C-alpha cells in the first residue's frame, strides 16, 4: 500500500511540475539564461584579474574610482585605454552592465568582443561563450545553429570550467530551438557524470529531464 501511495504522490508531483513548465517555460528559460551572467560571473573574473594581472586590475580600479554607478560610457572609454589583452575584463564588465539594463544588443557586442580577443585569457573567452549562448537563449527568434556554434569550443573539452553550464544551455537549445528532445536528454544525461557539476545544476538537469521526456512522449503520439 505504501508503494502505491508513494507512486501516486510522485505522479502528482510530476503532473504539477509539467503544468508549471507549460505555463511558465519562457520565464524559466529566461531565468536559466541568467544563471551565469551576473554576480557570480563578475566575482569570477574579478578574482581572475586579481590573481593573474595586478597591473591591469589596478588600472581598472583607478579608472573607475569615483564613478558610481559605473556607466557603459566609462567602461567603453576604459576599453580603449587598456592593452588588448586586458580589454576582455572591461568588456565583461560592460556586458554585465548592459544585461542588467536589458540591453541585449550591447551585451552581445561586448561578449563577442571578448570571444574575438585572441590574446585574452582562455578562461574569460570561454566564460563569454557560455554567457553569449545564454543571451541567445532568451531571444525567441535565435536559430539553434548560432547557439551550437557559440558553445562548441566549450563542449569539446570535458575538463573546461564551463563544460557543465554549456551542456545545460545546449540541452535547452536542443529542446526549445531545435525541438530535438532526444538529443537534449543525451546532453542532460552527460551532466550527471561531469566532474564539475553542482547540486543546483544537477537539480535543474533532473527537472528538465522530466519535462523533455514528457515532451518527447507527446511528440510520439
Image (spheres, rainbow, N blue to C red):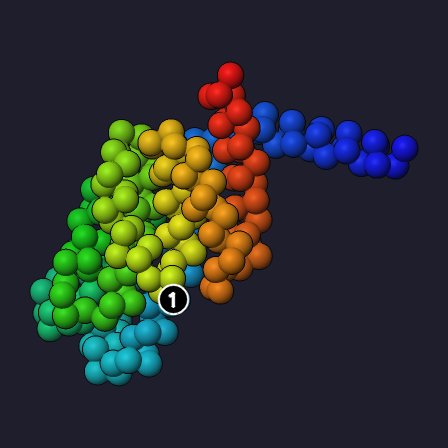
Residue 138 visible here: yes
Residue 23 visible here: no
| Quarter of the figure with the N terminus | top right
Residue 159 placed where, x, y %? 38, 66
Q: Secondary structure at mark 1?
A: loop
Q: Residue at x 77, y 29 (%)?
A: 8
Given the current orientation, which residue lies at the most extreme right position?
1
Rendered view: 32 above or below 177: below
Pick the front one: 39 or 139: 139
Pick the front one: 14 or 216: 216
Residue 178 placed where, x, y %? 33, 31
Q: Which residue is mark 1?
A: 159
> Image quarter for residue 136?
top left
The total of numbered circles placed on residues is 1
Within 10 angstroms of label 1, few (less than 14), some, or many (20 or more) residues?
Answer: few
> Image quarter for residue 145?
top left
Residue 14 placed where, x, y %? 65, 32
Q: Residue at x 26, y 56 (%)?
A: 153
- Left or right relative to 220: residue 167: left
Q: Residue at x 39, y 46 (%)?
A: 169
Rendered view: 92 above or below 203: below
Amino acid at each position: 500500500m505504501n508503494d502505491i501511495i508513494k507512486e501516486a504522490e510522485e505522479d502528482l508531483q510530476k503532473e504539477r511540475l509539467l503544468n508549471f513548465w507549460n505555463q511558465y517555460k519562457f520565464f524559466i528559460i529566461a531565468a536559466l539564461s541568467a544563471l551565469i551572467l551576473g554576480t557570480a560571473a563578475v566575482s569570477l573574473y574579478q578574482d581572475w584579474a586579481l590573481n593573474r594581472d595586478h597591473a591591469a586590475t589596478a588600472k581598472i580600479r583607478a579608472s573607475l574610482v569615483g564613478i558610481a554607478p559605473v556607466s557603459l560610457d566609462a567602461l567603453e572609454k576604459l576599453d580603449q585605454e587598456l592593452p588588448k589583452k586586458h580589454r576582455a575584463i572591461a568588456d565583461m564588465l560592460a556586458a554585465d552592465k548592459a544585461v542588467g539594463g536589458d540591453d541585449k544588443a550591447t551585451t552581445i557586442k561586448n561578449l563577442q568582443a571578448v570571444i574575438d580577443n585572441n590574446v585574452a585569457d582562455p578562461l574569460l573567452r570561454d566564460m563569454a561563450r557560455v554567457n553569449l549562448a545564454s543571451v541567445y537563449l532568451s531571444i525567441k527568434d535565435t536559430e539553434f545553429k548560432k547557439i551550437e556554434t557559440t558553445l562548441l569550443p566549450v563542449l569539446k573539452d570535458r575538463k573546461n570550467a564551463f563544460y557543465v553550464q554549456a551542456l545545460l544551455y545546449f540541452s535547452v537549445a536542443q529542446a526549445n530551438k531545435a525541438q530535438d528532445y532526444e538529443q537534449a536528454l543525451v546532453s542532460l544525461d552527460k551532466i550527471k557524470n561531469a566532474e564539475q557539476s553542482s547540486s543546483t545544476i544537477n537539480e535543474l538537469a533532473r527537472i528538465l529531464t522530466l519535462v523533455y521526456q514528457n515532451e518527447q512522449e507527446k511528440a510520439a503520439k
